[in-house]
C-alpha cells in the first residue's frame, strides 16, 4: 500500500505563533515529520512525502504546490490502496500505524481534534478527499455516497494533531523522540496548573 | 471486575462556566455520565457510581465525600481487579470499553488530554491512585515502583475528557446520544473556523 505523508514546507504551524517564531515553527514541523516517518518505517511501511516544496529529508518526495486536497486527490486517482497520514502526528507509534494499515474497510478514517482527518486508508478507487472545513464529517459522507460505510480507527495517538499551544503538553508527555527533545531543548516543560497541565517555556523567550 | 465511575455531584465542570451556567453544567455532566454508563452496560459491565453526593441515576452508588484519590483508593484497597472510568467521557463506545476491560496488564492506563488519567484497570493489589497534577505520569511511576510495567490503551474515545469549550466540538461530532442531544437542544452546533472547528451556541445565550 502506498503511504503518503503531506507536508507544508512553506509556512507551517502558524497557529503556534505565540510560542514559536517562524524558523522555530519550521524546525518543529520537521521534528514532527521525522517522528511520523520513523513510526511508519518501524511499522514496515515505505512512506512517500507529498510536499508543497522540496524538503531536506531522506524519503521519496513528490513536490506539488496545489492545495492539499487537490494534491492528495491526484495520488488517489492513481489507484488504491493508499494511506494518507498527516505530518503533525508526533504521538504516532509503530503499533498505532500498524493498527491503521491493517484496519479492515474500504475507507478507514482517523478523526483529528476539531473535525479534521488525521489519517485515512482508501481502498475504494473513487474515494476522494476534501480537507476543507469539518473534513471528517465530509469524508464520511463522501464514502457513503459511494455505498461504503466508513470505518473509524479509535487511536488517541493518531487523533492528536499538533496545531496549538494546548497541544504541546501531549507532545511533552507522549510524543516521539524528535519532537519531544526539540521542545525540551528549547526550554519547554510540563507545568501543573488548575485543571489540565500546560506547556511553559523556561528560557525567557515566552510565552 | 468491579467498574467504578467517580462523579462529582456538587459543582461539576466549572471550566465550562463561560458557556454554561451552573444548572446547565450539572445537567450536561449528568448527560455525559449517562453516556458513560450506557457504554459500560452495553459492553457487559455492571458499573457502580462513586459520588460525592447522592445522584438521581439508576445505578448502585457509594457516596464518599472525600477527595477523589482517597475515595478511589478506598475502592482499590478492597481488592483487585478494579476498573475506574471517569464520568466525563461522552465519546465512550461499547467497543472502546471492551478494549479497556480486556486489555492485558496488571496496570492499564488511559491518558486524558492534559496529563490526566481518564480510565484505568488495576489488577495489582497494591496499586493506588493520585489524581493530583500530571496523574498519568505519576500513575506510571506508581506502577513501576511496584515492579509493574504499565500498559497504555490507545483510544481517542477514552482519552477525550470534556472540560473546556475547546472540547465541545468533539462531543457534537463524535459524542454519545445523551450529551450530543443535550448540546444540540441548547443551540450548540459545529462551526467551521480558521483551522479547527469550534462549538458555537445559536440561541442568543452566548458565547
Image (tube, coloured by chain):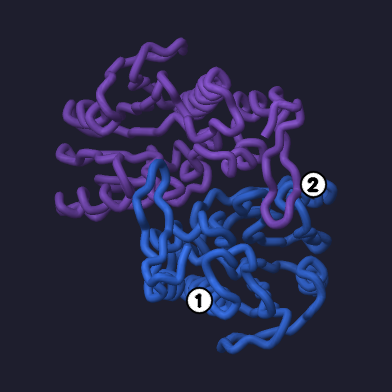
Chain colours: A purple, B blue
Which numbered dot is residue B31?
Answer: 1
Residue A188, position as x, y percentages in the image: 70, 32
Residue nearest the observer in this picture, B175 or B141: B175
State which mark lies toward you, 2 or 1: 1
Assign a secondary structure to mark 2. Answer: helix
Badge 1 sits on which subunit? Answer: B
In the picture, residue B87 is in which quadrant? bottom right
Q: Is residue B174 above or below residue A153?
A: below
Q: Nearer the viewer, residue B181 or A45?
A: B181
Q: Are marks 2 and 1 on the same chain?
A: yes
Q: Quadrant of residue A21?
A: top right
Q: Residue at x 25, y 45 (%)?
A: A106
Give how far across and how far down residue A29 sits, in percent: 51, 25
Look at the image and tell me whether residue B4 can be seen.
no
* B206 w.r.t. A164: above or below: below
The residue furthest front is B204
Q: Is residue A115 above or below residue B74?
A: above
Left or right of A6, for residue B159: right
Question: Residue B68: percent from the left, percent from the top?
Answer: 76, 69
What is the crowding at mark 2: few (fewer than 14 residues within 10 Å), some, or many (at least 20)?
A: some
For the residues labelled 2 and 1, the Cα–Cα distance comes to 34 Å
The disc at residue B160 is: none
- Do the CB atoms of the residues marked 2 and 1 lie less than 8 Å apart? no
Q: Nearer the viewer, residue A186 or B175?
A: A186
Judged left or right of residue B62, residue B93 is left
> Split into 4 quadrants, where in the image is the C terminus of chain A?
top right
10 Å neighbourhood of mark 1: few (<14), some, or many (≥20)? many
Residue at 59% across, 44% down = A166
- Residue under label 2: B141
Amino acid at each position: 500500500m502506498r503511504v503518503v505523508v503531506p507536508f507544508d514546507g512553506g509556512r507551517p504551524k502558524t497557529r503556534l505563533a505565540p510560542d514559536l517564531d517562524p524558523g522555530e515553527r519550521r524546525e518543529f514541523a520537521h521534528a514532527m515529520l521525522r517522528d511520523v516517518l520513523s513510526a511508519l518505517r518501524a511499522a514496515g511501511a515505505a512512506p512517500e512525502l507529498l510536499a508543497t516544496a522540496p524538503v531536506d529529508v531522506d524519503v521519496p518526495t513528490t513536490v506539488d504546490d496545489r492545495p492539499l486536497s487537490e494534491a492528495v486527490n491526484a495520488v488517489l486517482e492513481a489507484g488504491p490502496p493508499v494511506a494518507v497520514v498527516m505530518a503533525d502526528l508526533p504521538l504516532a507509534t509503530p503499533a498505532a500505524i500498524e493498527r491503521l494499515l491493517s484496519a479492515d474497510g474500504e475507507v478507514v478514517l482517523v478523526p483529528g481534534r476539531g473535525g479534521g482527518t488525521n489519517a485515512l486508508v482508501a481502498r475504494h478507487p473513487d474515494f476522494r478527499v476534501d480537507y476543507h472545513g469539518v473534513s471528517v464529517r465530509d469524508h464520511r459522507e463522501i464514502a457513503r455516497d459511494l455505498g461504503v460505510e466508513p470505518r473509524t480507527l479509535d487511536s488517541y495517538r493518531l487523533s492528536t494533531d499538533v496545531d496549538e499551544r494546548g497541544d504541546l503538553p501531549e507532545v511533552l508527555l507522549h510524543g516521539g523522540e524528535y519532537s519531544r527533545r526539540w521542545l525540551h531543548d528549547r526550554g519547554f516543560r510540563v507545568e501543573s496548573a488548575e485543571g489540565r497541565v500546560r506547556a511553559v517555556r523556561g528560557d525567557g523567550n515566552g510565552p
